[in-house]
Amino acid sequence: MHSRSLHPDAILASTALRAAQTTEQVVNTLGEKAPAITWDSSLYLAPLGRLLTTLRLIEGSPSRVLLVGHNPGLHALVEHLTGRPLAMGSWGRAFPPASLARVSLPRGWQALDQGCGTLAELQAVREGHES
């Protein structure tokens, strides 16, 4: 994220141990450019509906939000927002743990209807290597 200047304006993160560790690593990498983290225990194994509600309730008008959570909810969220199934990657899964999906949402956080966004990028990590 840092090397591609993908600096979030807001971070919403699950309080689960691995999600919290991942979030802290991102914040440490971003340094002074990192926004405050909003910790949300309801993101733990949250289904699609809960993730959509969380995003619709974002305060302010951040242009980039980093949502750190869990599958299968995040996988379902990306497919919902893009209106397309994720293709199986060379890593053996469509959206494995430690993946980063960048979805462009031209209408903002209130309009999260199915197919409202475009998948701009999908990065996945397999056995410690970025794919």
Image (spheres, rainbow, N blue to C red):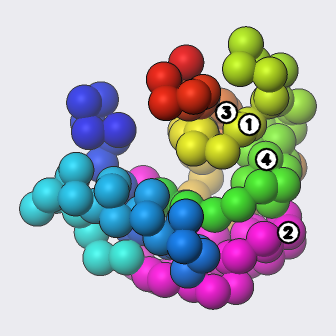
Question: Furthest-front residue in view?
Answer: 127
Does residue 111 appear in the picture of this structure? no
Residue at numbered disc 3: 118
Q: Residue at 71% across / 20% down in the picture?
A: 91
Query: N-terminal of the two: label 4 or label 2?
Result: 2
Q: How far apart are marks 3 and 4 (CA)?
A: 14 Å
Q: Mark 4 points at which residue?
A: 75
Residue 9 in percent (x, y) is at: 33, 62
Q: Nearer the viewer, mark 1 or mark 2?
A: 1
Q: Which of marks 1 and 2 is nearer the N terminus?
A: 2
The residue singled out by tag 1 in the image is 95
Q: What element does badge 1 sit on?
A: loop
- Discs 3, 4 touching: Cβ within 8 Å: no
Is residue 130 visible in this depiction of the protein?
A: yes
In this rendered view, identify the residue nearer to me: 63 or 96: 96
Task: Tell me the kind of residue under disc 3.
Answer: Thr
Which span of residues is magenta-colored?
38-64
Compare marks 1 and 4 and give the one earlier in the sequence. 4
